[in-house]
């Protein structure tokens, strides 16, 4: 229980930290224009390393935070991240296989899915169909940036996870 | 010798082969032991803690004088007690951790999302609590980050501005250099223009003489030059003994001609002597260069009879009786004069009409003085 509470707080802080870094710090760097999607990386990471439930919960709350700050209508981000968390959770059984391309492909697919879903939710539904511009100016650069950020953050997050769930596993197995 | 060395080497190798395996396991075991000790220590600590929690039925028993708990452990124990409280009151069937079917969770959370989308699009009231929570949790952090971020970005902007200013400065410097070069060339062109204008004036003045304009391409001394080379030669119709004028005055005479160059000896040359006459009285004199006067921008005249009345700033022109110089060309103006020691002749100094220090263009009069010899 203690570890659950602690982990909850850690994830909570991680989500807020990622949100602030993504939308407040990196978004302000003038020449970038796009920011790596850290919330997505977080969702992906927890889905992939901890399973469907963890991925879904992290994704849901991460999306909710993004929703609250950027959307009139709540729930779109939460839904997208929820789905991403669920799909990544399906690949959880390969987490310890150390096959390197699985997380990379997963991350790329996740971000592509996020971008397309975002485009559908926020552009197509408003009747805007400038897919070409969005693709070249937002989606592809963000994809690349997210990929790079994911590569950089994979090991630290894995390490953090291993620390976070060291006792958690014991506790679960004991009970 | 070599055999011995080889043997020694082999022995050494052999011995070195033996020793490392003896060392290696020890090293490994030491590290392993260290780690296992650490893990054991951790585990014991944990176990002891659990035992301690298990033993302490009362929450007030934390303050053990022999083994005081750290604040962190106190908090930990506090949570553990709460957990134990729930554990005690849990039914045996609920003992296992709740395992949520992911699909159910997906459906539930998805339903929540959809509900949120629908509800929040209908009215703002649904979003309000979320926004309130966010404003409490996220916004202060954002503000903090922003203040730090603004400071940093201000600095970065300052730096980039500095870089811009630096680049601009560089550009402007380049521009200044360019403009200076342009200016210099324009000035030169202006000077050339002026000279050419003067030459044209001269041409008008000596309209009866045909002239060829030529550039001075080489001079044999620095400031004041006695002989110099011009850019026109026999191909352009220049011949020996042609008179050279510039800026309305006599410069010298062509002494040597090449196909595309000519050498001119100027009137200030120490070797040069011109037969001149005073403009007013038409009295003859000899004007010759003098190396000692060169630096003073003067030439001298001599062999003027005592009866001649010389006035200052009187013009001296080439005389009719000169063998090589055309008549009527301005040589210069009388600067000073005095009676010679013999009291039979007068002599003095002449300021040449041409400024020899800045001579760049000259006109060559193609007409030759026709003399009997």
Image (cartoon, rainbow, N blue to C red):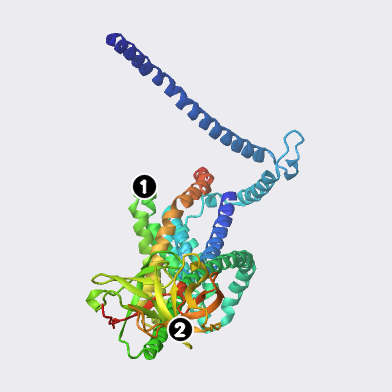
Query: Would residue A145 appear left or right of A66 to someone viewing this image?
Result: left
Give yes or no for contact between labels 1 and 2 (Cβ–Cβ under 8 Å).
Answer: no
Q: Nearer the viewer, mark 1 or mark 2?
A: 2
Q: Give residue B202's quadrant in the image.
A: bottom left
Q: Is residue B188 visible?
A: yes
Mark 2 surroundings within 10 Å by alpha-carbon count, few (fewer than 14), some (14 through 19), many (20 or more): some
Mark 1 surroundings within 10 Å by alpha-carbon count, few (fewer than 14), some (14 through 19), many (20 or more): few
Q: Give residue A37's quadrant in the image.
A: bottom left
**Circle 2 sits on which residue?**
B283
How far apart are labels 1 and 2 at the CA level? 118 Å
**Circle 1 sits on which residue?**
A98
Return the residue nearer the eye: B279 or B285: B285
Q: Position of residue A164 (x, y in %)?
A: 53, 49
Residue at image point 40% right, 89% down? B201
Q: Is residue A29 visible?
A: no
**Vertical position of residue B156 compared to residue A95: above or below:** below
Which secondary structure lies at badge 1? loop
The N terminus of chain B, quarter of image:
top left
**Vertical position of residue A13 compared to residue B194: above or below:** above
Q: Position of residue B42 (x, y in %)?
A: 57, 36
Q: Position of residue B255 (x, y in %)?
A: 31, 70
Q: Position of residue B294 (x, y in %)?
A: 48, 68
């Amino acid at each position: 229980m203690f570890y659950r509470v602690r982990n909850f707080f850690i994830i909570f802080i991680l989500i807020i930290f990622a949100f602030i870094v993504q939308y407040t710090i990196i978004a302000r760097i003038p020449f970038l224009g796009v920011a790596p999607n850290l919330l997505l990386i977080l969702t992906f990471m927890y889905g992939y390393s901890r399973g469907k439930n963890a991925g879904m919960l992290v994704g849901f709350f991460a999306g909710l935070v993004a929703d609250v700050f950027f959307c009139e209508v709540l729930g779109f981000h939460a839904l997208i991240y929820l789905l991403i968390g669920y799909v990544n959770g399906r690949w959880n059984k390969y987490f310890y296989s150390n096959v390197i391309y699985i997380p990379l492909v997963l991350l790329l697919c996740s971000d592509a899915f996020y971008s397309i879903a975002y485009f559908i939710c926020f552009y197509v539904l408003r009747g805007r169909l400038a897919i070409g511009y969005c693709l070249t100016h937002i989606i592809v650069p963000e994809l690349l940036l997210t990929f790079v950020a994911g590569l950089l953050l994979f090991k630290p997050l894995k390490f953090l996870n291993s620390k976070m769930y060291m006792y958690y596993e014991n506790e679960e197995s004991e009970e | 010798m070599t055999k011995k060395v080889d043997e020694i080497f082999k022995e050494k190798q052999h011995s070195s082969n033996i020793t490392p395996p003896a060392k290696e396991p020890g090293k490994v075991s030491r590290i392993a032991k260290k780690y296992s000790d650490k893990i054991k220590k951790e585990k014991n600590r944990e176990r002891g803690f659990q035992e301690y929690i298990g033993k302490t039925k009362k929450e007030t028993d934390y303050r053990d004088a022999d083994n005081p708990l750290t604040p962190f452990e106190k908090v930990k124990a506090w949570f553990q007690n709460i957990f134990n409280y729930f554990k005690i009151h849990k039914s045996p069937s609920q003992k296992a951790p709740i395992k949520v079917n992911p699909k159910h969770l997906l459906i539930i959370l998805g339903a929540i999302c959809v509900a949120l989308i629908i509800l929040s699009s209908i009215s703002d009231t649904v979003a309000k609590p979320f926004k309130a929570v966010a404003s409490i949790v996220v916004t202060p952090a954002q503000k903090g980050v922003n203040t730090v971020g603004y400071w940093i970005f201000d600095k970065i902007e300052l730096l980039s501005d500095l870089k811009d200013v630096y680049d601009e400065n560089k550009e402007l410097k380049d521009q200044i250099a360019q403009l200076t070069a342009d200016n210099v060339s324009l000035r030169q062109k202006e000077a050339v223009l002026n000279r050419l204008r003067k030459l044209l004036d001269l041409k008008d003045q000596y309209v009866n003489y045909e002239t060829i304009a030529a550039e001075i391409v080489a001079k044999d001394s620095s400031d004041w030059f006695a002989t110099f080379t011009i850019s026109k030669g026999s191909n352009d119709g220049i011949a020996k003994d042609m008179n050279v004028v510039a800026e309305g005055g006599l410069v010298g005479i062509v002494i040597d001609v090449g196909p595309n160059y000519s050498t001119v000896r100027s009137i200030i040359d120490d070797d040069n002597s011109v037969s001149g006459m005073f403009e007013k009285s038409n009295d003859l004199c000899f004007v010759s260069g003098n190396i000692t006067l060169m630096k003073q921008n003067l030439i001298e005249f001599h062999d003027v009879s005592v009866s001649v009345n010389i006035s200052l700033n009187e013009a001296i022109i080439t005389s009719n009786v000169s063998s090589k110089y055309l008549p009527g060309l301005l040589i210069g103006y009388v600067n000073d004069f005095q009676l010679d020691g013999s009291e039979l002749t007068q002599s003095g100094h002449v300021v040449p009409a041409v400024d020899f220090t800045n001579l760049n263009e000259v006109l060559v009069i193609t007409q030759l003085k026709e003399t009997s010899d």
